[in-house]
Structure formats: C-alpha cells, structure tokens
Image (cartoon, rainbow, N blue to C red):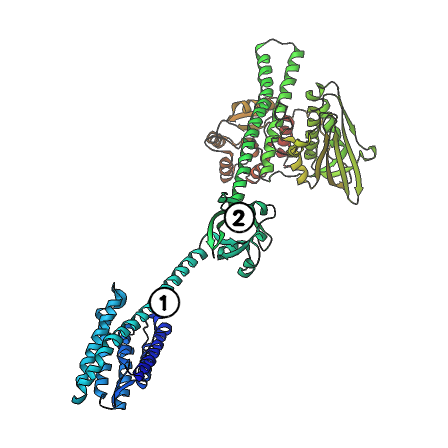
Amino acid sequence: MEKSIIIGLIQNIAILLSFTLIYDFFWAKDENIKKISGKVIAGLLIGFIAIIVMYLPWTLKSGIVFDTRSILLSISGLFFGAIPTIIAMSIASIFRFSLGGDGMWMGIAVIMTSGFIGLTWRIFFPPRKIKKPYYNILLLGLLVHAVMFLCTFLLPHDSILSTMKFLILPLLFIYTPGTMLLGMLMLKRWSVWHQQRAMEKEELRYRTLFENAGEAILVSEGGYIRFANRRLMDLLNIGYEELLSKKFTAFIHPDDREFVMSYHLNRTRNIDVPNRYSFRVVTGSGEIRWVDVNSVLVDWNDKPASLSFLSDVTDKREDARQLVIAKNKAEESDRLKTIFLTNMSHEVRTPMNAILGFSDLLITRELNMEKQEHYINMIQTAGKQLLSIINDIVDTSKLEVNQLNINKQDCKLYDIFNHSVEVFLNNPIYQNKKNVNLKLNFPKDYQNMMVNTDYYRIQQVISNFLTNAIKYTDSGTINLSCEIKESKGHVNIITRVKDSGIGIPDDKKHIVFERFRQVEENQYREGAGLGLSISKGIVDLMGGEIGFESKVGKGSMFYFKLKLDKVKGHGMKIQTEHTETPNFENLYIIIAEDDMTSYYLFKEYLNDTKAKIAHAADGELLMQMMEEKVPDLLLLDINMPKKDGYTCLKEIQEKSYKTKIIAQTAYAMENEKEHCLSSGCDGYVSKPIDPEILFLEIKQVLNNKK
C-alpha cells in the first residue's frame, strides 16, 4: 500500500477518535436527549467531522478519493440516532457534491447508504441490548462496506474494475475492522458512563439513606471522623467542616473518652470488644447527651476504621430515670399508706374503744356518782381526741386544695400561749408523763399586747409542737417561749418549743414536715403524722417561717416566726365558763335530721329550754310538716334523704315561709358555711355540736344579730 494512503488512513483514524470524544463528553452522558436543539448540534458536529475526514483523503486517481466517512456515518446512525445522522449525511453529501470528480456519485451513495444502514441496524440490532456486541458491529461493518463495494458501479466504466481490485483488501482488513473498533470504543464509553451513572445513583441512594436515617452515622479512622451524616451534625450541633477537623474524642464526655477510645483502637486491631455500648457526648452548645452506639470494623481507603451508628437516648434515659423515681415513690407511698392506715386504725379505735367501753359500763352497771363522772370525763376526752384526728385529716384536705383560710380577729397575744399551756396541763397525755415539766416563758411587758391574727390557727400550731414534744419526751422540761420585737404597726414574734426528748436523726430530718410521716416509722408512736405538716401549711399561709433544730439524745427545738398586726383596745375574751341554759318557752322548733342519734342529742340539749320540739326524718317530711305549721326555728341538716337541705331551702324561699333557719352539718370544708348562708340560712353550726355554741347561735339568729 502506498505511503500516502497510510498517512491518509492515520489522519482519518485520528479524526475518528475525536468523534468518540464528542460521544463521550456530549452524548453518552444522556443517551435520551429529548431536545431537538441538542440533536441538531450533535448532527452539525458529526457533519463537521465528516468534512474534515473528506479533506484528508487518500487518492486512488484524479477525482476518486477514499476516507473513513462510511465508518463515521454508520457508527453515527448506530449510536446517535436519526436526527444527528441525517444532518451529518446532508452536510457530508453537499460537501462531496461540491468537490465533484469522477467519484462524486459513488461518494454521495456511500454517505447515504452508510448512514441509513447504521440507522437500520440501531432499530433491529441495538448493540447495547444484545449478548455479543463485537460480532454485531463486525457484521455491520461488513454490510456497510459490501454496499460501498457495490457503489463502485457508479464510477466511470473504465475505473470500476481497477477500483474494485484496489478496494477489496482495505474493505476487508481496514474498513470493516475499523468500523468494529470504533463501534467498540463507542460502546465502551457508553458502558463506562452508565457504570458511572449507576455508581452515582447508588451513591446518591446511600447518601439519601444516610442523610435521612434516624440514627447519626460516622466513620472514624486514625482518630478523626472521615464521614458523617446530617443527623450527627444535628446531634452535636456542629458544622460539617468543624466536625471533620477535630478528633472524634473531642466530642466525647471527658469521663467516657478513655473506654470509648480503647474500644475503637482494639476494634481496629481485630481485638474482640463490645459492639454495643453507651456513652455521653458534649454538643457544640455544651449540652451533655447520652447516646447508644453500635460499631463495626470496616475498611476505609485500605485502612481499618469503625463504622458507628449513634442513637440519642437522652430522653429515654431520663424517662427511665423518672420511672425509677416514680416506682420508688409509689413503693414509698404504698409503705407510708400502710403505716398511716395502721396508725389511723389505732388512733381511731383507741378513743372509740374508750367511748364505747365506758358508755357500755354506764348502761350495764350500777355505778356510784364518782365513777359515773370519771367515766363521762373519759368518754369526753376520747371524743375530743377522735375529733382532733378528724380535724387534722380535714385540715390536710383543705391544704391540698388550697381552701384553708386564715380568719383574723383582735385578740391578746398572751392569751393564745397561756390557753395552749392550760389545755395541755389538763390533758391526760401530759398528766401521764410524771417526769416531764411544761413551762411557759412569755415576756411580762407584753402580756397585754393586742394583735390582729387568727387566734385558733396559731394555737393549733403551738398545740402540734407541744403534742410532739410531749410524745417524744419521757423526762425533763418542755419549754414554750415567745420572743417579741416591735416595729411600726407590727409585731414580729418567734415562738419556740424546746424539749429534752429523743431528738431527730439527720437522715430523718427531711421528712419531718411531710404528711403522714413519722421519725420512727418502724415502730408505733401515737399520732397520724399530720400535725407538723399542717403546722407548716398554716405558717406558710400566714407568711411566716417554720423550722427546727435537733440532736439525737439531746432533744429538739421547733420554732415559727410570724409578723402580726398590732392593735389597740380590748381583745377577744377566752370563754371558760359555761353559758346558762336559755329559756325558749313557746318557741316551736323543727329538727330536720335523718340521723336519730343526732336528733336525740339535739333534743336533749333543747329539753331544758322549754321549747316545743318536732322531728322531720327527711326532706319530704319536713316540707309536709311546714305546710301544716311553719316553725319559729328550723335546725336544718344539709345532708338528708329524699330532699337535701339545699332543695328544701329553695322550696321554703319559693313558698315565702317566714322562719329562722340554722344549718347544722357534718361537712367541714371552709366554704360550706358561706354556701349555707348564701343559700338562705340565718345561722350555721357544725357537728359535733357544742351546746354553748348552739345556744349562742340560736340567740343571735332570733335576735336578728346574724
């Protein structure tokens, strides 16, 4: 073969390589280009390459030239499709026509047949979808150049035979293999691009999975974080660049770094370590979070690394901690409830035993006057003890619902303390303590001082202090003292009750003011464990301070501080003498009471008043009796069957009955009195009934002083 032919062939092959570059960078990235503009541009580029190829041919004789356009256009049809190939065929045909010569029609025919054969092959034998693309493209090359061989008949007659002889070997050994070679290069580029796209899609899929995972994911190698997802950045509250710039131990709590780093190093050395464990991390804002981690050994750039999945379990740990606390509280509450119920059973049954027992003795035995009086006193003492327990439970309930009110009145401060001591001096609990001495230390200069405060509530706190002191002191002195400091319009008092009792251990001091708690819960002590908690509630309501000091074996000192309003004049007089039985002659009284015991008690109280008494056992009977005769006074029980007291009050108002009404109820809530009075009652007494209070209330109601 001539040297010029070899040079032309090399030049054509170099140009065809540029054709593969166009496919590589322009077409293979998206084989499904939809836009016409892209296809037109591709066709123009291929046509331009065809012109260059035809500019560098090898010449058989004048007017008859050969190049690799057949390879170019057939492969274009196979890989680029109709629009780019037809545009390229058109450009190449026009250019070949402009060159003229004896081989013009053969050249145009080769252009047209090569392109259309490639397009036809694309339809019926797409190389990407057949199992043996090498043979497929080789057959394409044979067909294209067999047709090219036949196109020599379009040459002048005197050139046909010589051209056929010249072409037979290049067609078999250059053009056909060249077509296969170019086709395989194109197919290889298509395969590489598709593998790359598949890898990119796979990477994007994994990246999407990592970024949207519920757990934080990281790869740690060489002490640094090499990869992390968004969840880890959110967990640590830190940016990606900063995350990768620091050692991963920088984010681990100092107390946990050593064992976490040890696990990591041993894992990278193929030493068996736990895969699952927990540790604390410190976020960018300084917050400490708990994480559960699951780590495995992976290869990262040919180096051992840890792939870790982190779950934020801070809230779960806190929930678990709260559950443990709640469980412990529930168990403690159950234990305290058992203790409380045991104590309450004892506290209630003890006075009830005295009440029922001495009552039975009064009924069944003939007793002298001295024993009768003694038994009656015992019954009254037990009744007061039982009432005190009930009052404590009621006060506790009021404190729970913020319904305990402070009712202030003018009184003498000294009377509160003196009366408290007098009550205890006559109390059997104190009298049984033969070796205990109760003393009052009150400043003599202030014994006539008048204050405006709740007399009963202060006395209640003092009484609770004294009760506790007497309970836990078997010998020695109990000292009740009051320290007074005056200021403009006010009096600051510090009340102390100091005893020489058993004292309170340090590990029990925190429960002293808790409800239903007692220092010695493992053994029985009198009381329901409510007194000190009620005292604290009262002092808090009055804006004061309460506390204590105690040492085991040395005794305790309880105190409270209050700021009271100072007043001038005479205060409330403590009633110590019995009121004389009033005369209610010609007074018609209906006692509306479903409890027969309570009715008989009322009747006994009123027997000596010479009043005319009638009984209504329920609300319906009461209204029937009032239709017959309206009483001068109605003692109305609020809680009655058939019609309760409030229903009766409403009917009495609707029927305009003119009568005085005193509500009598066992309800003890603070707003019960106000409710009764606002519903139409003229007076109010609560059970258990004190006859002196009952008589005083009746007098005030009948005299229109209520």
Q: Which residue is mark 2?
A: 264
Q: Quadrant of the C terminus?
A: top right
Label 2: state its secondary structure. Answer: helix
Q: Nearer the viewer, residue 479 or 199?
A: 199
Would you identify the image quadrant in which residue 401 lies? top right
Location of residue 446 with respect to 32 vertically, above or below? above
- What residue type is disc 2 on? His
Location of residue 382 with respect to 50 vertically, above or below? above
Residue 451 placement (x, y as % from top left)? 75, 38
Residue 334 placement (x, y as % from top left)? 54, 30
Label 1: state its secondary structure. Answer: helix
Mark pair 2, 1: CA separation: 39 Å
The mark that comes first in sequence, 2 or 1, is 1
Number of other residues with Cα within 10 Å of mark 2, as a class: few under 14, some 14 to 19, many 20 or more: many
Task: Answer left or right for 50 relative to 370.
Answer: left
Disc marking residue 193: 1
Would you identify the image quadrant in which residue 634 lies? top right
Task: Answer left or right for 305 relative to 160.
Answer: right
Residue 65 placement (x, y as % from top left)? 26, 86
- What residue type is disc 1 on? Trp
Location of residue 287 with respect to 53 vertically, above or below? above
Would you identify the image quadrant in which residue 357 lies? top right
